[in-house]
């Protein structure tokens, strides 16, 4: 496992950026003052305690999740359990009482080393605690691919799920990395990471006033 991590980090530092995007970026919505983000809980095989952090932007229109050990890999001598890693972060977003928010988009970045015939999957699920509606996005990479990657999600205003006004509900961000060795050389390892210098996930707020 340590060899796979060292290989992933070394390759990430040596190569440039390749962007894979969905919809073009939209203008960031205005944000209220006095907004902060607190991490309530962190769980998952992709983000052991102390390996992730959350930082809100100065203009309060977005926050970034950084990872340091988020890596899935398959093939070679990798154990099947290592082909899927996940991370669930439960956030408490503090804002003025007459404002609420949702997530209108996200930018996910990482690095992949996929052999010919292998594939990788990046999946994200956004939802509020106890709320029946969620937003899901999935992106796939196919080998051979050895480079940085960027996936961009943008939701239309009508798709944004807002925290119900006057209710205390934390935001859950559930991400998943999967690697399928497929028809690749069984002696070679493929990996997908969000644990290098270039890796992070930036989530964009949509703000609105409560009536």
Image (cartoon, helix red, strand yellow):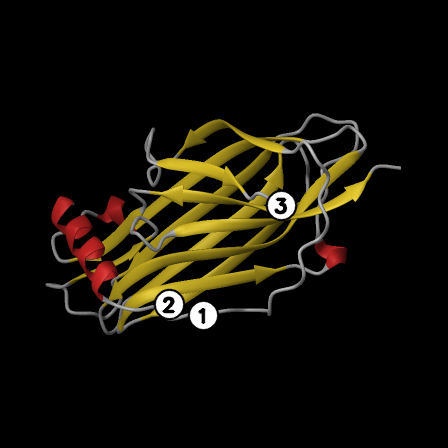
Image x and y of residue 184, in percent: 20, 70
**Lower sequence index among marks 3 and 1:** 1
Question: In front of the other: label 3 or label 1?
Answer: 3
Residue 78 visible in image: no
Disc 2, SS:
strand
Residue at the spot 49% in from the left edge and 39% down from the top edge:
55
Where residue 20 sits: x, y (%)? 45, 70
Q: Which residue is mark 1?
A: 20
Element on which disc 3 rests: loop
Disc 3 crowd rating (10 Å Cα; few below 14, some 14-19, many 20+) is: few
Question: Compared to 31, does 116 lie above or below?
Answer: below
Q: CA distance from mark 3 to mark 1?
A: 26 Å
Mark 2 in CB contact with mark 1 (< 8 angstroms): yes
Instruction: Tell which of 119 and 68 is nearer to you.
Output: 68
Pointer 1 local density, CA inside 10 Å: few below 14, some 14–19, many at least 20:
some
Disc 2 to disc 3, C-alpha distance: 33 Å
**Residue 116 image offset from top left, x and y in percent:** 23, 74
Of the 4 image quadrants, the one containing the N terminus is top left
């Amino acid at each position: 496992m340590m060899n796979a991590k060292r290989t992933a980090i070394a390759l990430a530092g040596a190569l440039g950026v390749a962007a894979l995007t969905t919809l073009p970026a939209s203008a960031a919505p205005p944000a209220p003052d006095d907004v902060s983000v607190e991490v309530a809980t962190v769980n998952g095989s992709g983000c052991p305690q102390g390996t992730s952090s959350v930082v809100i932007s100065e203009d309060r229109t977005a926050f970034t999740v950084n990872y340091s050990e988020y890596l899935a890999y398959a093939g070679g001598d990798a154990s099947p359990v290592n082909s899927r890693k996940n991370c669930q972060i439960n956030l408490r977003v503090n804002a003025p009482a007459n404002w609420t928010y949702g997530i209108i988009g996200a930018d996910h970045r990482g690095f992949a080393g996929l052999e010919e015939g292998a594939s990788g999957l990046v999946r994200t699920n956004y939802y509020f605690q106890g709320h029946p509606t969620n937003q899901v996005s999935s992106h796939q990479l196919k080998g051979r691919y050895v480079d940085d990657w960027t996936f961009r999600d943008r939701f239309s205003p009508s798709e944004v799920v807002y925290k119900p006004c006057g209710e205390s509900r934390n935001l859950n961000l559930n991400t998943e990395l999967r690697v399928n060795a497929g028809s690749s050389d069984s002696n070679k390892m493929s990996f997908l990471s969000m644990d290098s210098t270039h890796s992070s996930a930036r989530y964009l707020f949509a703000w609105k006033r409560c009536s």
